[in-house]
Amino acid sequence: MRVANGVRALVSSEGAVLRDMRRDSTFSLNPLGASVWKLLQQGRSVDQIIDQICVDYKAPRETIEQDVRAFLETLESHKLVITERPTAV
């Protein structure tokens, strides 16, 4: 999964604002969403993101995994991130 082209972010300790330049739309993220976004920008896998969030927020993996996956699905539905699937040979 990666950040879509044309999406810009302003991240702070209070959260983040995402701007989709292609669709002229803006999205606000809370601090947890901003943490996930930063990890996505670093090229981390979904499992690596979940692991890091569990450490940072000292929360059970089951809860974090469910929340992070739901959040990523929302980002994908708004075309802010892209899931790269392997191409057939």
Image: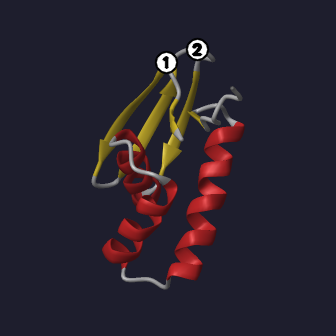
The mark total stands at 2
Q: Position of residue 8 (x, y in %)?
A: 42, 26
Mark number, residue 6: 1
Tell me the residue that label 2 is attached to. 22
Location of residue 69 with respect to 28 vertically, above or below: below
- For residue 9, which quarter of the picture? top left
Q: Position of residue 27 (x, y in %)?
A: 55, 37
Q: Position of residue 67 (x, y in %)?
A: 60, 67
User: In what quadrant of the picture does the N terminus appear?
Assistant: top right
Mark 2–mark 1 CB contact (< 8 Å): yes
Nearest the viewer among 59 and 45 is: 45
Which residue is depicted at the point 43% across and 38% down? 17
Location of residue 21 with respect to 64 vertically, above or below: above
**Amino acid bearing label 1:** Gly
User: Helix or strand or loop: what does disc 2 sit on?
Assistant: loop
User: In what quadrant of the picture does the C terminus appear?
Assistant: top right
**Amino acid bearing label 2:** Arg
Mark positioned earlier in the residue sequence (2 or 1): 1
State left or right for residue 84 relative to residue 58.
right
State left or right for residue 35 relative to residue 87.
left
Which residue is depicted at the point 63% across and 70% down? 66
Nearest the viewer among 17 and 48 is: 48
Location of residue 51 with respect to 89 vertically, above or below: below
Which residue is depicted at the point 67% across and 49% down? 73
Which residue is depicted at the point 43% across and 59% down? 49
Mark 1: few/some/many CA within 10 Å (<14, 14-19, 20+): few
User: Helix or strand or loop: what does disc 1 sit on?
Assistant: loop
Residue reaching furthest to the front: 89
